[in-house]
Image (spheres, rainbow, N blue to C red):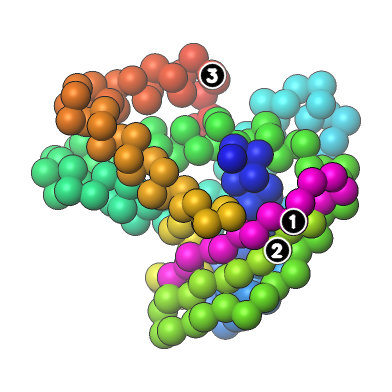
């Protein structure tokens, strides 16, 4: 699952210039920018293999501006978001963002030299909401179906969920955090996230 989502993140990484994204259809944005990220990974492949932590910089520069982490965090926490204080919301969003980068950034390298192809399929665009459906083909294994849930905010299309072979990233994390918050409370969950992120290397 992690590798599959990582592949999805790879194809999302260069959603592109925000102003251009406001005018380009979401499908075209994903199509055009995926090749640019593959190129960036391949050009820096040797250096990244020597020091994989350098990929965090690429992810931070290219990926993060195109995700709405506040909306993702709100959906992941569900009711707990409404009960959380503004400070708790801010701290959770930051740690959740770091968690995603830490978890999936290194996995992107596994696809740098693979024959990754993205074939946009029919998707739905409804005003400020869009679903981009894709099929990712790699040299080995079955094609991976990846859907991107996006919304138009501040003149830019931003991703707020990724669904891989029918499994939603947001839904998966929602169940995990709901249990942890019920058992330990919001502050303890945030503290645990921070400890895990720090032990794996700070990506901020």
Are the residues at dot 2 and dot 1 in contact (C-beta closer than 8 Å)? Answer: yes
Q: Using the rendered image of the protein, determine whether residue 156 is visible from the camera's viewpoint.
A: no
Residue 10, position as x, y percentages in the image: 68, 50
SS class, disc 3: helix
Disc 2/disc 1 C-alpha distance (Å): 6 Å
- Magenta extent: 138-151
Which of the two discs, 2 and 3, sits closer to the camera?
Answer: 2
Q: Which mark is residue 197?
A: none
State the residue at coordinates (49%, 82%): 125
Q: Is residue 95 above or below residue 154?
A: above
Disc 3/disc 1 C-alpha distance (Å): 31 Å
2 or 3: tag closer to the N-terminus: 2
Of residues 21 and 131, the one nearer the viewer is: 131
Dot 2 surroundings within 10 Å: few (below 14), some, or many (20 or more)? Answer: some
Whether residue 84 appears in magenta in the rendering, the answer is no
In terms of image quadrants, where is residue 178?
top left
Q: Using the rendered image of the protein, determine whether residue 135 is visible from the camera's viewpoint.
A: yes
Dot 1 surroundings within 10 Å: few (below 14), some, or many (20 or more)? Answer: some
């Amino acid at each position: 699952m992690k590798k599959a989502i990582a592949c999805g993140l790879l194809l999302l990484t260069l959603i592109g210039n925000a102003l251009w994204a406001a005018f380009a259809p979401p499908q075209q944005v994903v199509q055009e920018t995926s090749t640019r990220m593959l190129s960036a990974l391949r050009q820096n492949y040797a250096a990244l293999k020597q020091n994989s932590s350098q990929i965090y910089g690429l992810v931070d520069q290219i990926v993060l501006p195109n995700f709405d982490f506040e909306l993702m965090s709100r959906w992941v926490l569900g009711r707990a978001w409404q009960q959380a204080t503004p400070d708790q919301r801010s701290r959770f969003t930051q740690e959740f963002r770091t968690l995603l980068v830490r978890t999936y950034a290194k996995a992107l390298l596994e696809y740098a030299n693979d024959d990754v192809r993205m074939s946009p399929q029919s998707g739905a665009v409804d005003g400020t909401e869009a679903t981009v459906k894709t099929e990712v083909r790699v040299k080995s294994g079955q094609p991976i179906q990846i859907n991107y849930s996006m919304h138009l905010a501040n003149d830019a299309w931003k991703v707020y969920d990724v669904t891989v072979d029918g499994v939603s990233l947001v839904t998966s994390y929602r169940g995990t955090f709901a249990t942890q918050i019920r058992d330990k409370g919001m502050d303890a969950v945030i503290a645990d996230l921070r400890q895990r992120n720090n032990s794996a290397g700070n990506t901020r």
